[in-house]
Image (cartoon, coloured by chain):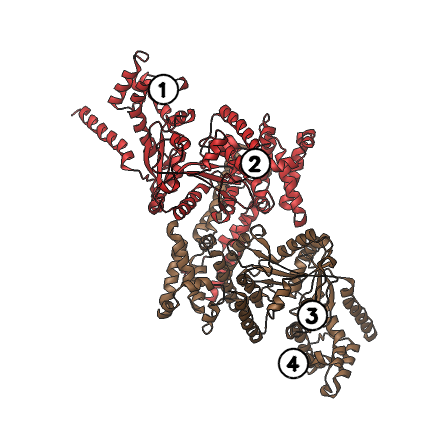
Chain colours: A brown, B red
Amino acid sequence: MNKKGLAILMRARMRAAAADGSSFPASTNSKLALAAAPLPTAREGEAIRSHGDGDRLCKQQGNAAAASLPPQRDLDVVRDAMHSAISSNKTELLDTVLRDFSEGYFGLSRDHRRRLLLILAKGYDLNRNQARELMKQHLGLQLPAGDGGESDSPKDEAMLSAFYRIERNLRQALKPAYEVLFERLNTHPGGLRFLSTLRADILSILQDENIASLRALDTSLKEKLTTWLSPVALELYQITWDDPASLLEKIVAYEAVHPISNLLDLKRRLGVGRRCFGYIHPAIPGEPLIFIEVALLKNVAQTIQEVLWDDPPIPESEATCALFYSISSTQSGLAGINLGKFLIKRVITLVKRDMPHISTFATLSPIPGYMQWLLCKLASLSQASSGVSDSPFMESVLEPDEERALMNSSGETYAGKSGAEVMLSMLTSTNYDWASNAEMLSALKPPLMRLCARYLLQEKKRGKALDSVANFHLQNGAMIERINWMADRSEKGLRQSGGIMVNYVYRVEEIEENAQAYFRAGHIQASEDVSRYIKEHDVRGLKENDGAKPL
Amino acid sequence: MNKKGLAILMRARMRAAAADGSSFPASTNSKLALAAAPLPTAREGEAIRSHGDGDRLCKQQGNAAAASLPPQRDLDVVRDAMHSAISSNKTELLDTVLRDFSEGYFGLSRDHRRRLLLILAKGYDLNRNQARELMKQHLGLQLPAGDGGESDSPKDEAMLSAFYRIERNLRQALKPAYEVLFERLNTHPGGLRFLSTLRADILSILQDENIASLRALDTSLKEKLTTWLSPVALELYQITWDDPASLLEKIVAYEAVHPISNLLDLKRRLGVGRRCFGYIHPAIPGEPLIFIEVALLKNVAQTIQEVLWDDPPIPESEATCALFYSISSTQSGLAGINLGKFLIKRVITLVKRDMPHISTFATLSPIPGYMQWLLCKLASLSQASSGVSDSPFMESVLEPDEERALMNSSGETYAGKSGAEVMLSMLTSTNYDWASNAEMLSALKPPLMRLCARYLLQEKKRGKALDSVANFHLQNGAMIERINWMADRSEKGLRQSGGIMVNYVYRVEEIEENAQAYFRAGHIQASEDVSRYIKEHDVRGLKENDGAKPL
């Protein structure tokens, strides 16, 4: 594909993005998996197949032939190929069988893929009877009194010898047969990429149905992929305007945070004052698994507009800050495998080495879950105040002065409504009218900023930040530095986070400590500026409660 | 190192080879492991360390400092570093700890390495109590009656769910703690090479002492290395005279089959009509893990002299045969990991593609175990005939006419001795006198050739060919094509195999079938020419027995 073709692709993608309306930082694992999952639906299977992961493989396959076969026959053929791929010992034939299987798989309908994956998960599980036989043998032996030291009496040695033998066999017996398929595909040309597709399909099914055997299949595949995609196996690659269009089109297609709007936009992101780095695996050449976009700036940017549209960029020698403004994965099948963490660390090391004048490493990040969380809170409060719910634990979301300001700015439209109802109505108004209304903006800003700080710092799920992007950077060892008002005025920015964006900062010397504290106790490191939003609220809330308390 | 340095190294090596007197095809795992093992002995530790695997790492270490510390202190320090390398969760510190550990390890004496490896094997084994607890839980559950099909009743799902959970935990519990060390080293710069050194040491200890826990440690490390050194991770590299001397010196140092005698010899092996290919791993750059030397010839060579000394070589366009005349491993720590098999296959594919006029792929191989086996047989026969042993099962090793010819050629020196005794005396004569005595040669040739065929085709150990090189090529799918008289007149050739060499042939279309038949039933595929030696003997033996049978 030449760069003209790239321009055509970009127009097509822009249309698709407009229709879809959603994209998501890729290191998190929810929406992107849906958006880019290669599982074909009955209607759009062909379209997806000619763009998705299975592109090349699929082209080799006779689509016409596949279409002329009755579907059931198709599934049986692929099932047979899968069986041979697992059980055949003829390494000479293996390549053919693996190719038949992967090509056949791409020809299957969504439903048939689902059935095949279930057959794989259940029919090629471990031999449970054999494993239990070995467990009984193990439990039948008495543990030596060994002190774990250097003592090696002949008797201990003989006893240990029996343990080692059973344990070796038990490890083998606990290995499901489908791992053979994964391992064989990994060493087969194109196989690693196919495995990523396979996992994207598994994840897509698991979003609809919680099937234990399929979840076990996913756990096993994820573990294998994590090993095979260890950072040592990946090459850090700087993507530039000199790269082939076939690579650049991947950047356009998979940029998930700030869609690339035209060729000029792409060229700027690869030009002076900008960097783009990807991780490339030798088995998937010409296609970064994940890539990060970096702007070299004087200060940590507060809005995405100045990153994407400042013109001209400052001379690179004047930069003191490397701002990560986008990180995207190209493989939905690698969800949950944190390549981004290593990518960020390696990019920091590289930039520090090449440009010692750069001392600040920060992000300008979206807050993809903020509005969803807030609207949910406001809706339940509105219900409560209109008597539908009678929960005795009425949560105070708005400060009294915030509520007053909202009432005043709304005029007569919302007469008789509560502050929460007014806020909900404003935020859900068509075309984000509030964002172009100065009066509403000034009334909305204080509660939106304060609640955003609360959302980022205090809202958790299983001890981790509720927001997926926050969780990503915090587990990597970043801290929350600043939240920025009207930092992303795009439709997507307003919809996701009311236009607010956040700067996370990576302080090299604190990364490890932060990551550990977050991992162990869910501790979120934040600047004074951000923490103050919460503290002021807490103090004020405390005072008001004091006043209202019946003594 | 420049090429002058290389010449100096080669002289040094020639002296060492003369002193050592042994070298061995590397894909087999016995002698080379000893010859190149990096375990230092008390006396020669320093010398080995400045040449062996640990070269670079060792240079970083202050040898002087290590020497000034009391040994026990040294071991404790390295032990502490090892403990941190396994148990630390601070990924930031990990690189330092791993470096401390590997550098410290290289500074240890042989005995301290042994003690440290035992601590690792026993003190960082699996948590057996935890594993057994999980086994009890597993056995406490009733197996579902599942048919391995697509049935997924909610009840089955819930039951399976419990199994999957316990099995996942049990797999984890069965993982010895030392695997963490292996995995961390694998992703640490220089770590893969260090692991190979570690394993060379383990193997060296296991040759002297059979310690169960150390054997389990070896099994685990070998498994890991096999995964990390899978053929997809390795790059096929053609070594030429244009390569850096630092790489070429490795070829000189590790050529284990036909030592490289001088720079001219090396240059010829990399020049016209010759090829040298190596497998390189990205983590161990500039040093092939294994390499193979190939001669492009008109016919399958019968003697190594014509391969090493034919002058000038034929034009490459006239070649019809690619002869593999040497394959050597540089890493004794990779013993038992069959990289050679994949290397040979890839070289065949490459040569077939680049030179379609080449249709024969053969080896000219040593038979390293033949003389040892034969002398052993002859010695026990001699004992038997002189009345020391009274085994009733006297094996007939020599044919009557062979025995007569030997008696005639020996003259009066061996009057009153049996044929076996005469043969034994001749073969063990000083300076291999028999090889320069025409009469002895003609008397020895028939029994030596016939017994060589018998050794290669019929002598087995656990169902596999007794000869290690034969076993290597047969398991790779080659067949035994021809045995060649006086094919290697070097001291080593005469000592190992009475100067006989063997051609194995790789017929691409039969490789898989041969390998399978050998693997399953120990079946050895051989040409009519070679098989005839055995058959004629069998027929003759049968006739003589018939005649002697008391009717």
* Residue B53 marker: 2
At label 3, counting other C-alpha atoms closer than 10 Å, the crowd grade (few under 14, some 14-19, many 20 or more) is some
- Kind of element beneath mark 1: helix
At label 4, counting other C-alpha atoms closer than 10 Å, the crowd grade (few under 14, some 14-19, many 20 or more) is few
- Residue A15 location in percent, x, y? 55, 74
Closer to the camera, B358 or B109?
A: B358
Between the residue at mark 4 and the residue at mark 3, the CA separation in whole angstroms equals 20 Å
Between the residue at mark 2 and the residue at mark 1, the CA separation in whole angstroms equals 41 Å
* Residue A305 marker: 3
Between the residue at mark 2 and the residue at mark 3, the CA separation in whole angstroms equals 55 Å
Query: Circle 3 marks a residue in which chain?
Result: A
Taking B344 as reference, is B264 above or below it?
above
Sooner in the amino-acid sequence: mark 2 or mark 1: 2
Q: Nearer the viewer, mark 4 or mark 1?
A: 1
Between the residue at mark 4 and the residue at mark 1, the CA separation in whole angstroms equals 102 Å
Closer to the camera, B256 or A78?
A: B256
Closer to the camera, A24 or B483?
A: B483
- Residue B421 location in percent, x, y? 33, 18
Does mark 1 fall on the same chain as mark 2?
Answer: yes
Does mark 3 fall on the same chain as mark 2?
Answer: no
- Residue A146 location in percent, x, y? 58, 38
Q: Amino acid at mark 3?
A: Gln
Residue A396 visible: no
Residue receiving disc 1: B436
* Residue B230 marker: none
Q: Amino acid at mark 1?
A: Ser
Q: Amino acid at mark 4?
A: Asn
At label 2, counting other C-alpha atoms closer than 10 Å, the crowd grade (few under 14, some 14-19, many 20 or more) is many
At label 1, counting other C-alpha atoms closer than 10 Å, the crowd grade (few under 14, some 14-19, many 20 or more) is few
